[in-house]
Image (spheres, helix red, strand yellow):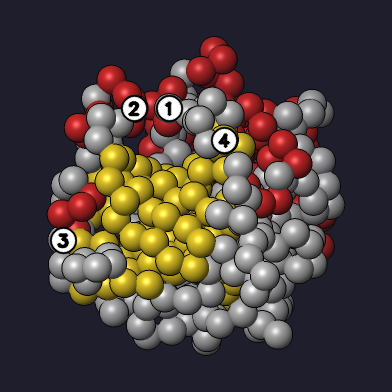
Amino acid sequence: MLFKQRSKRGTAIGLSALAMVALGAPAVVYGADHLDAPGKFQSPLGRHDADINDVYAFPADATHTVLAMTTHPALGVITTQTAYATDVAYRINVATNARGLKGRRHPGDRVSFVVRFGQVRQDGTQSYHVTRSNGDESEVIASGRTGSVSTSEHGKVKSFAGPRSDPFFFDLSAFNNTVQATGGTGFANPGVDFFKALNTNAIVLQIPNRELGGDKVSIWGSTTSLDGKVQYDRMGRPAINTVFNGFKKVFNSGVDTDKNDFNAIKNPAHDATVDGGKFRANVVKVLEEFSSLSGTAYTDAQAGGLADVLLPDVLPYDTSNPVTNGVFNGRSPADDVIDTELNVVTKGAVPSDNVGPHTDYLPTFPYLGVPHS
């Protein structure tokens, strides 16, 4: 496995760096995409079982990629219904170019790995099937039962679905009590990882690179009704929705219902332009407000330039580059996305939350740590 964590302070963060810190509504800070619905501790459309936490893409070796999506935030604590929904399609979407982001009009440029689950059995497990679909053709490439690693008949695809320890790491409480509450810029050293003891559900796929449809791709996760007509949640890079749409209520004295509206966009190509460009305007506003902590806020032009990189909300990934960073090229569980995001969103005023990766990541498939008891 090729986990390579980028140095916290050695990452060059320029104007094109992305700004996504794990924030939420006033007095509550969520995770990367955990509970990103309006209000306090809410899942999109009230569906904890369709709530995406994080999306990952990283190399398993020179010819295989790992795609992972975690769901069911704070499994067993906030999400008390731990089963996967039988009426939800869990999707990891891959576009090979800009046309692929536009969906059905260009099916050859977009692939979706769709996971559907059966009813809970007496032993507590669920069966599942993984379908690779490009809009015109669909093929079942993997199947299995939750809680166990499965390998396809020809050994090309590995799959796992079930509880794992949440790989996300962040000092949530310190952010609540400093940056968000008082406008401060300091975190205790060492920080306290709020997510360290939490569990989540995870879908993990290890597939040949050729199944992605190209070397340089854009990746995002989504959860929809089985017929695809209703989209509950979506996520590409960490915390786009939780930060930039969630903080509209803080900075504009409005409501944060934009989060549900953003989650409903099925075509990421429309992120910056839909509804008169309100989501791009949200990004610009939040960047300017948080960067003021540095003493010199981003200009309109600078914030606009960042917004044009942040949207559409997809995670770039290059299969030929084994070094992931969670922002510009894929994301592995050990990538410290929060330090990068804090630096950019505050224009360097908050350099780190002083929390590092978890120590329970596995060196082999399914890579995410075993669930906490």
Identify the amino acid type marked 1: Asn
Q: According to the image, label 1 marks what residue?
A: 267
Label 2, label 3: how far apart the Cα atoms are: 25 Å
Label 4, label 1: how far apart the Cα atoms are: 16 Å
Q: Which of marks 4 and 3 is nearer the N terminus?
A: 4
Depth-wise, is mark 1 or mark 3 nearer the camera?
Answer: 1
Other-residue count near label 4 (Cα within 10 Å), few / some / many at <14 / 14–19 / ≥20: some
Label 4, label 2: how far apart the Cα atoms are: 17 Å
Q: Which of marks 2 and 1 is nearer the N terminus?
A: 2
Q: Which residue occupies the foreground of this view, 336 or 43?
A: 43
Q: Which SS class for mark 4?
A: strand
Identify the amino acid type marked 2: Gly
Identify the amino acid type marked 3: Ser
Q: What residue lies at 38% left-to-right and 72% top-to-bottom?
A: 150
Q: Can residue 96 be seen in this view?
A: yes
Q: What residue lies at 64% left-to-right and 61% top-to-bottom?
A: 120
Q: According to the image, label 3 marks what residue?
A: 320
